[in-house]
Amino acid sequence: MSEYIFKLPDLGEGTVESEIAEWFIAVGDQVTEEDLVGTMMTDKAAVELSSPVSGKVLRLAGEPGDIVAVGAPLVVFETDATVEVPARQEAAPAGNGAAAPAATTEIAEVVDEPVAADAEPHTRVMTSPAIRRRAKELGIELSLVPGSGPGGRITRKDFDQYIERQAIAGAPSASAIAATPVPESTEIKVIGLRRIIAERMSESKREIPHFAYVEEIDITELEGLRKHLNSKNDDRSARLTLLPFLGLALMRALRDFPQCNTTYDKARNVLVRHGPVHLGVATQTPDGLKVPVVHHAQSLSLDSLSAAIKRVSLAARDNSAKKEELSGSTITVTSLGKLGGIVSTPVINQPEVAIIGVNRAVERPVVVDGQVTVRLMMNLSSSFDHRFVDGYDAAAMIQSIKEMLEHPATIFLP
């Protein structure tokens, strides 16, 4: 018997440490080579790691929420023989159907650990960390969930459908629900993506003097155009929302207000004014808020931009987004859809200097040419870094977007 030390590999992009997000194994488990052992969280993505060897788990580096340095021991296995693996291999983001082997190998003396009598080999189930966490919270065995994705991977739709089937089959009676005890309180450790979100939001509000600007927009004509274009498209999945129209209007406005398509390099105290528009799309996911990016959005048509927004948003939700799709944005749009309310105060996505927020569209009476009429109205709630974007310029850019959205034909002018 030999002891094999699986060290945390280099997860890419200069990562020097990573947070333990979730373990799929426990001390005493028998693990087969290529079984998933856990998920590590970097600033960019959740990364699933697989075992480089077969053996028994002797020790783990820590608990979820603990930080592990690259090259530090992550898992210690007891193996039957000396194992040789490559010195370094790349890890893959969770959801891409790949996992990372160890970075280095060390052989040492055997350390005896008790093994549970009923321990069973760990079965590999392909799915995202978010679904694993939901399954754990709900007490669902993932091996029982049919997967329709590549290689039998369990998608979010698969998991939701399984929950619905179980709920219908075993719905409790009203008396049983009433008799169920309610816990007084529950402690939830702030780890993983939620911790990163908390740190970034706090840093943004602490360091950036936010200047908020809200303007109402009459989108009656725009909505008519959107419905007309959708009526010509039999593919329901390709139908347009308001967001790509806003994206096109924003990119036209940025030609006159390039100071808003800027990022601030704090380390060098330099503003980087970008030519291309790399559009961030704030997206709510089961793991929390993510900002996938449509790169070079200024070169896309309305349909192409719409498809790209849907693609990166879906990839962010199901954890299949690549690292480059979660970084590099130069300005962000955000929308709460039907929950958009009247006004919001979006937090700037550092190192950007502006964020454009969409509120709910509602019909209400307004005065047009001296007459009261019903129009479809929507507010834009935006925030700007007042250190680098003057209030006048922020207001002027939003007014430019307003004019284009109220006269949608102008969005498509060269």
Image (tube, rainbow, N blue to C red):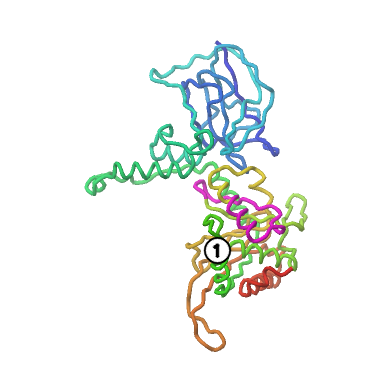
**In the image, which residues are magenta?**
285-311
* 297 displayed left or right of 46: right
Left/right placement of residue 260 relative to residue 226 reads: right
Quarter that holds the N terminus: top right
Q: Quadrant of residue 188?
A: top left
Coordinates of residue 126 in the picture (x, y in percent) = 51, 34
Residue sitting farthest toward the left = 175
| Image coordinates for residue 181, horizontal then vertical, percent | 28, 44
Q: Is residue 342 above or below residue 170?
A: below
The residue carrying pointer 1 sits among few (fewer than 14), some (14 to 19) or many (20 or more) residues within 10 Å by Cα, namely some
Q: Quadrant of the C terminus?
A: bottom right
Quadrant in which residue 142 is drawn = top left
Residue lying at 48% horizontally and 71% vertically, measured from the top left:
362
Q: Secondary structure at mark 1?
A: helix
Q: Residue furthest bottom?
A: 370
Point out residue 391 in the picture as x, y percentages from the top left corner. 68, 70
- How many numbered marks does the figure carry? 1
Q: What residue is pinned by disc 1? A: 230
Q: Position of residue 242 (x, y in %)?
A: 57, 64
In depth, the one of 236 and 34 nearer the eye is: 236
Residue 287 is a magenta residue: yes
Q: Nearer the viewer, residue 115 or 359?
A: 359
Please name the amino acid that badge 1 sits on.
Asn
Q: Nearer the viewer, residue 265 or 102?
A: 102
Does the magenta run of residues contain 169?
no
Residue 245, located in which quarter of the rendered image? bottom right
Residue for point 41% across, 19% down: 116
Answer above or below: position of 316 versus 213.
above
Q: Name the residue at 75% across, 66% down.
A: 255
